């Protein structure tokens, strides 16, 4: 049984977290350790739902802030499941995404005993996998009272810069039909793979929108991420498919984004072709007009920027809670064999969030 020593500071706690494997669907041991550690913090009421842990202060403050982060990591690669410390650098699976943020949160839960607002600490399972496994979604569905609050902060890695809101995402698979024939007599058939050419050309020519919201510029993208087709080496294929991923700015709904995508590609589709949506998640606006999130930008000392990917900021926004991304660690190292974080940035991040919690209310 691994114990977390909350007296070791953000870096020491992060090192302890790195030593407990928590690949998606296998977060139980880490959730156990986090639950025991939080139960030892005075003034916190702790709840365990599945492999997610929520701890709340009850200081009778007028307003409440939620600080949330996911317990799970992607699978290991290149031996990075073995954590290491080299000088100021902690390396290992999840160091960037996002056990550094979790280590800072646990340190703050232990040390910030009189914040200006009530605080909810949320450590949830299943962020790195399909949305249906997301522990935060389950908490909203089964225990929404645990997540009531005025604003939320996601500790996703942002290199200590506020990354506001997030873009939405669509994944569409388009199936194109043809007619089989022998490759020696292709005029007797119709090649479905060849029909992909104008579709791919339209995708490659996609003109990105770059709307600016609350001073943050978003950049829409459309990419082909998978192609399937072919029957045999001597058969004209009668079916081909391309899978697309569209990242759209939060000033558009998912329905509006999909409508625009159809307008782009419908000229290349015919009766018998198919359009299958396999994933859809709306984005979230920056929310920086909320005074708490504006104050976070001020305390961070850096100008905010748009979050171009999707995060659970959108999950909070869907439930009426403005939220932003703000965490330690270089986001470009997330999911790589070289995940790492420095002791210095962990300490700076913890100090910034502690100052922010003291200035609200």
Image (cartoon, rainbow, N blue to C red):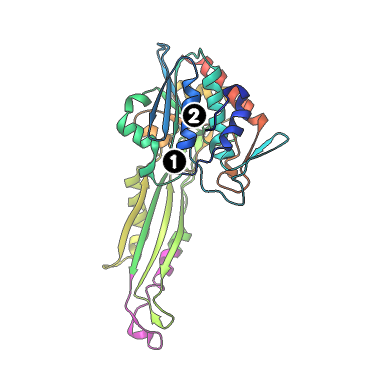
Name the N-terminal-most of marks 2 and 1: 2
| Residue 93: % across, % down | 58, 43
Tell me what residue is drawn at x 36 percent, y 85 percent.
187
| Residue 346: % across, % down | 62, 29
Q: Tell me the SS state at disc 1.
A: loop
- Provide the residue designation for mark 2: 34
Residue 242 in view, yes or no: yes
- Residue lying at the far right in this picture: please name it: 87
Q: Is residue 265 above or below residue 74?
A: below
- Residue lying at the far front in this picture: please name it: 1
Q: Which residues are magenta?
A: 177-200
> Which of the numbered marks, if any, corresponds to residue 12?
none
Foreground mark, 2 or 1? Answer: 2
| Residue 12: % across, % down | 63, 29
In the rendered image, which quarter is residue 55 located in? top left
Q: Is residue 97 magenta?
A: no
Q: CA distance from mark 2 to mark 1?
A: 17 Å
């Amino acid at each position: 049984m691994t114990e977390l020593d909350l007296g070791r500071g953000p870096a020491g706690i992060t090192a302890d977290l790195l030593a407990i494997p928590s690949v998606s669907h296998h977060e139980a041991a880490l959730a156990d350790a986090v639950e025991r550690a939080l139960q030892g913090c005075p003034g916190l009421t702790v709840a365990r739902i599945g492999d997610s842990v929520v701890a709340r202060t009850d200081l009778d403050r007028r307003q409440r802030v939620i600080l949330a982060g996911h317990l799970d990591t992607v699978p290991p690669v290149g031996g990075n499941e073995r954590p290491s410390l080299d000088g100021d650098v902690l390396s290992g699976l999840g160091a960037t995404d996002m056990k550094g943020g979790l280590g800072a949160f646990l340190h703050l839960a232990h040390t910030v005993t009189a914040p200006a607002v009530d605080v909810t600490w949320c450590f949830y399972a299943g962020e790195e996998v399909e949305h249906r496994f997301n522990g935060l979604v389950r908490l909203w569905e089964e225990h929404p009272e645990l997540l009531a609050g005025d604003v939320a902060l996601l500790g996703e890695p942002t290199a200590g810069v506020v990354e506001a809101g997030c873009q939405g995402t669509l994944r569409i698979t388009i199936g194109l039909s043809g007619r089989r024939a022998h490759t020696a007599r292709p005029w007797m058939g119709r090649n479905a793979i060849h029909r992909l050419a104008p579709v791919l050309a339209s995708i490659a020519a996609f003109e990105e929108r770059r709307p600016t919201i609350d001073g943050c510029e978003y950049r829409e993208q459309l990419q082909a991420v998978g192609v399937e087709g072919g029957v045999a080496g001597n058969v004209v294929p009668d079916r081909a498919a391309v899978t697309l991923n569209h990242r759209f700015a939060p000033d558009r709904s998912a329905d509006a984004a999909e409508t625009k995508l159809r307008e782009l590609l419908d000229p290349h589709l015919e009766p018998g072709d198919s359009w299958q949506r396999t994933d859809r998640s709306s984005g979230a606006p920056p929310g920086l007009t909320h005074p708490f999130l504006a104050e976070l930008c001020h305390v961070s000392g850096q100008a905010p920027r748009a979050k171009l990917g999707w995060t659970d900021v959108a999950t909070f926004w869907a439930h009426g809670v403005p939220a932003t991304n703000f965490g330690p660690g270089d986001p470009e190292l997330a999911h790589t064999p070289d995940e790492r974080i420095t002791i210095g940035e962990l300490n700076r991040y913890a100090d910034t969030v502690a100052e922010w919690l003291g200035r609200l209310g």
